[in-house]
Amino acid sequence: ETGVTQTPRHLVMGMTNKKSLKCEQHLGHNAMYWYKQSAKKPLELMFVYSLEERVENNSVPSRFSPECPNSSHLFLHLHTLQPEDSALYLCASSQDPASGRGDTQYFGPGTRLTVL
Amino acid sequence: AQSVTQLDSQVPVFEEAPVELRCNYSSSVSVYLFWYVQYPNQGLQLLLKYLSGSTLVESINGFEAEFNKSQTSFHLRKPSVHISDTAEYFCAVSPIQGAQKLVFGQGTRLTINP
């Protein structure tokens, strides 16, 4: 596979469930990102990882827990979510987030999450 | 901090007509500017970006955008649209210095009618 892949593509969960979203990039990039895309709201940056270290956490509630075991994989662990957390969760990667070169971010297709 | 405003949430146009999608931004620091496109059921793809140099940038599929520093704008244009251009278009900025953090506008849904 090429580019950025995300699994699952769709997920329905109850408020007491625990689930994980997975992202994998095949581009040899050093940085990975999680974004939240809600209806009628701009995309919101949630987390940034550079060389497997978290460099940005945009005031995201603790019920979202990211994990970056290596530069190719990124997870988002979910627990005790609320219905308002229903959204499209997008993963992206780029070469180097601190290069100052305006590197392009490459996005996966997203996971459509519904919290009941 | 940065903010991006896309002035139109929806733009309907007829096929082969010209289109302009408007984008204004606010920032206390210098920024790079981007346009991303999202086709149905897909992730975002870079359409074009302005980093430096000529203020007019072009994409491979006929779109262009012009950076206007005095008006803090980065409007996207195409002289003749096709049905395949139907998508949602997002304007975004990122500070030149420090970690790359894209700040997006609300998006503009472009609908092409035959």
Image (cartoon, coloured by chain):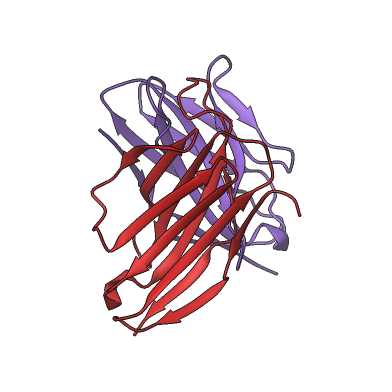
Chain colours: A red, B purple
In the current view of this chain or complex, which residue is farthest to the top?
A: B53
Left or right position of A99 against B112: left
Q: Please state if A70 lies on the left or on the right of B113 as rendered.
A: left
- Whole-percent x, y for residue B53 in the image: 56, 14
Check the picture and name the quadrant holding the N terminus of chain A.
Answer: bottom right
Question: Which residue is rendered at x = 53% and y = 60% of the image?
Answer: A22
Q: Residue at x 25, y 33 (%)?
A: B1
Nearest the viewer among B103 and B4 is B103
Q: In which quarter of the image is the C terminus of chain A?
A: bottom left
Above or below, A36 against A13 in this view is above
Q: Where is residue A20 in the image (x, y as percent from the top left)?
A: 46, 67
Q: Residue at x 32, y 70 (%)?
A: A79
Residue B64 in percent (x, y) is at 62, 36
Nearest the viewer among A54 and B39 is A54
**Residue with the most extreme front position:** A69
Residue name at image x 39 percent, y 58 percent:
A36
